[in-house]
Image (tube, rainbow, N blue to C red):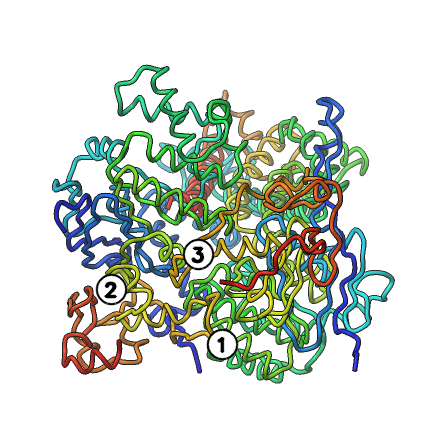
Amino acid sequence: MTEKPYAEIKDLRRVFDVSKPWLNRLLEGGEQQFLKAVDGVSFQIERGETFALVGESGSGKSTVARMVVGLLPPTDGSVLIDGVSMIGRASGSERQKLRRRIQMIFQDPYASLNPRWRVSEIIAEPIRAFRLIEGESNIRARTDELLSLVGLHPADGMKFPHEFSGGQRQRIAIARVLASNAEFIVCDEPTSALDVSVQAQILNLMRDLQDRLGLTYLFISHNLAVVRHMATRIGVMYLGRIVEISGGHELFARPQHPYTRMLLDAVPDMDMSGRQRTPISGEIPNPINPPSGCTFNPRCPFANERCRREAPPLIAGVACHAVHEGRLASSAAA
Amino acid sequence: MTVSTQASSTAQNLPTSRIGRFFDSDIWASFKRSKLTMVAAALTLMFLAVAIFAGVLSPQNPFNPAELDLLNSRLPPIWEAEGQAPFLLGTDEQGRDILSAILYGLRISLLVGFLGVAFSATLGIALGLIAGYFGGLADTLIMRVADVQLTFPAILIALLIDGVVKSVLGGDLDATTILAVLVFSIGLSFWVQYARTVRGSVLVEKNKDYVAAARLIGLPAPAILIKHILPNVTGPVLVIATINLALAVITEATLSFLGTGMPETMPSLGTLIRIGNNYLFSGEWWIVAFPGFALAALVLAINLLGDWLRDALNPKLR
Amino acid sequence: MDNPVLSVRNLRVEFVTRRGILKAIDGVSFDIGRGEVLGVVGESGAGKSVTGSAVIGLIDPPGRIAGGEILLDGRRIDNLPPEEMRRIRGKRIGMIFQDPLTSLNPLYTVGEQLIETIRTHMPLSASGARKRAIDLLAEVGIPAAERRIDSYPHEFSGGMRQRVVIALALCVEPELIIADEPTTALDVSVQAQIISLLKKLGRERGTAIMLVTHDMGVIAETADRVAVMYAGRIAEIGPVQEVVRQPLHPYAQGLMGAIPSLRGEAHRLAQIPGSMPRLSAIPAGCSFNPRCPFAFDRCRVERPEAITRGKHPVACHLYDSVPAAAEAVA
């Protein structure tokens, strides 16, 4: 039974104009410069699963997240959540209905809560904005319930964000997201700013909530190990494009794209197996002036002439000429 | 599975109310350490109290002609030979008690000062919020107007606006209208600093994730500005307002001294100084000196308070 | 350890605040030998950065060293006057900070900064210093070093900048380098390059390296020995293989269990309840006892000293009692 996917992202693009101001260009010369942050990204998410987007800096994953959730308008492409588009001519109230269902957890727990508001007010805000509950005491009861749900005490509602640690603030942020009864949650590096033991608590909490409430997650991260614990399917991004999409276990067991293999190799070896590693050469190029053809080609040991000319399309979950042409022996992780 | 909030303030015996937290804070501690600031604060409070209760405290209402007696005119201060109680600081040529005149004058000076600051702060904060949040044309327009205005001394601007409005309204204006015009002109000449500071803070705050979270629940821009951003940008405003208060008082005094400010029927300290100036060379020095001292003391006290506040609120100095 | 390059004995660092004295570090001892990399790992608030700052003499008021000794090559450096400490800091101890953007002065070229440091501590001519700087840049892996030496910091990418910072730390041949989160601000692929560079340089030059970080993976890759810090004290210290594979201290065990890995079962991560205590509220006895699944009465009252029962030192009462109890945990 092929059911329509819950979220369908098609050919998403986002270009930023990073040219110098008009006056400067007039006086100093120089042309307009554009940054292709996201260059044709497509993927689907099934209801109830966790889809992860992994990449290093400049990969565009955070930009994709913001476009999916509606904070940033795409330059091109479409985002359909349960058949409804976030962009376009939807009326104000329709958009508001969609907003209630999609929410975001941000990376920086110190900037995502208004320092001047009390915690219970922060959590109650979506309830009021979407008019989910009437009556002060009912709202209060709900915020208390939400605080308990994320592992905090209802009395914590009276406090201000600065009285909490990073991990606790992320719990508050999760409570806020749940307050709108959202079903699709975009998580932008939710644990990157947290200590390892706190990260474990938050990740476990997120999984528990997903099981209890049937949530769907779009999980953005640069940390492959974290993603492995959370994701059902994973997309690897490099310089604005998806280079590989694969199932959670598949990606780690049988990585195909050269970048994915190198990325996995580069992750520090906690088990100290002393395995031999191919060091990644070079660094991420300037995204304003990306290499032609396949953007990974300067760093790829398998690049040939075609790679320098032609950008490989995403076929069977990989965007790589060498893989398509069969030049790359399929690897099973050592 | 409850994560114990080890930051529980009740466990640490920290106060939980806002007032409680203020008195426990570093600001209050620094206040108690600086004797000069405490004196300045006390002085300012005293001036405020006195101005509010002028009617009750002063021996005479000097602007009620019924209470004046020409027989009391030109009396020197009480410690001089011809001085007479209850006229502690002497009287002027119409028999008005200088001390009473100062108390009432203080009231007008402070009134214009506070209202002027309130006006410029409101205007400046509003424009700063708009310029910072929306950027683009609104930002450019507001900031260029601000830049142009900054090239002129505030007093000249106040003078200009004052003159223009008065000529538009024409004819003889009663004292209350003049007060309103003064507040308007002073307010318009000082909004720039608020706008710039607020705009800078808004630029920082609007990129923070809590603003994004507010957008995600569909809050319209004005709601985001007022409910979320405004509370976080008002910190430096308090410092500016305090220093601005002193400037507003001086500006009003200057305008009144030049004759375009408060009239004699409802004089401020500046007006009193202008009046008293005429009698300086006939030997009746007290008519100009005491209002002058009062003005100087007031402005000094406010300035010192503003200085301390700026240092106390500056996180880098702590 | 014979002739360690750095020896820290019972170091205590306090911060004097209005609300009382906060003990940031409360009795920390360790040695680092020639050519060895010691990892100091801990979560936020554990005191690892303060340890690094204390060694290099950069604790500013209201903080102060309240006790203990720091010995560099056998001689005390914690009680030196600021002038002498300054000289040691440049010449004998190098420092690498987390953010390469702010470690380098944006107004001077990379060459100017290197040459200035070199000539401050070594009697070289301008051209001699320049040659040395170029050699250093090449050694840390900057391609076309003789051209890049005249570039400004902002003209380098993040990873390259960090290499320049490493070159700067090495240029006067220090005996000890303190690296505070050197790879945290870098991408994973660049991290790997920097880690292997640090290891290589340490080994080749015999420089002792104190690597302070919260990233256990980096420690596993780079360090020879590791000290696990908790609330200002060392919970466990030993060879990295032993501590990572078979941690003894319950906190270290919890920590290793909480780290997601690329191998093994991808189940629920083990989690330690609660969070690291604030400096103003450190529990009595063993500071970990409220969160420890094995805590017993003695733990709540008496602070554990480091005990070596066979393997490596661990500060936990479990290893001080009946051997059976220790085995039940290990």
Q: How far apart in space, not on screen, are marks 3 and 1 (Cα)?
A: 20 Å
Mark 2 or 1: in front is 1
Q: Are marks 2 and 1 in contact (CB under 8 Å)?
A: no
Q: Residues within 10 Å of mark 2 (few under 14, many from 20)?
A: many
* Residue B167 coordinates in the image, percent (x, y): 79, 33
Specify whether C241 is left or right of A261. Answer: left
Q: Who comes first in sequence, dot 2 or dot 1?
A: 2
Nearer the observer, A19 or C122? C122
Relative height, residue A161 to residue B241 (above, below)? below
Relative to B31, does residue C136 appear above or below in the rendering? Answer: above
Q: Quadrant of residue A310?
A: top right
Query: Marks 2 and 1, Cα distance to the nearest angstrom?
Result: 27 Å
Both on one chain, marks 3 and 1?
A: no
Assign a secondary structure to mark 1: loop
> Is disc 2 in the same subunit as disc 3?
no
- For mark 3, does the 10 Å Cα neighbourhood hold few (<14), some (14 to 19), or many (20 or more) residues? many
Residue denoted by label 3: A268
- Using the numbered discs, state the Cα–Cα distance from disc 2 to disc 3 in whole angstroms: 22 Å
From this viewpoint, which residue is outermost toward the right?
A: A89
Q: Residues within 10 Å of mark 1 (few under 14, many from 20)?
A: few
Residue labelled with disc 1: C267
Residue B209: x and y in percent read 60, 58
Which chain hosts label 3? Answer: A
Mark 1 falls within which chain?
A: C
The residue depicted at 30 percent of the width and 69 percent of the height is C246
Query: Along the line of sight, which residue is nearer the eye, C267 or B146?
Result: C267
Residue designated by label 2:
C236
Q: Nearer the viewer, mark 2 or mark 3?
A: 3
Badge 3 amino acid: Pro
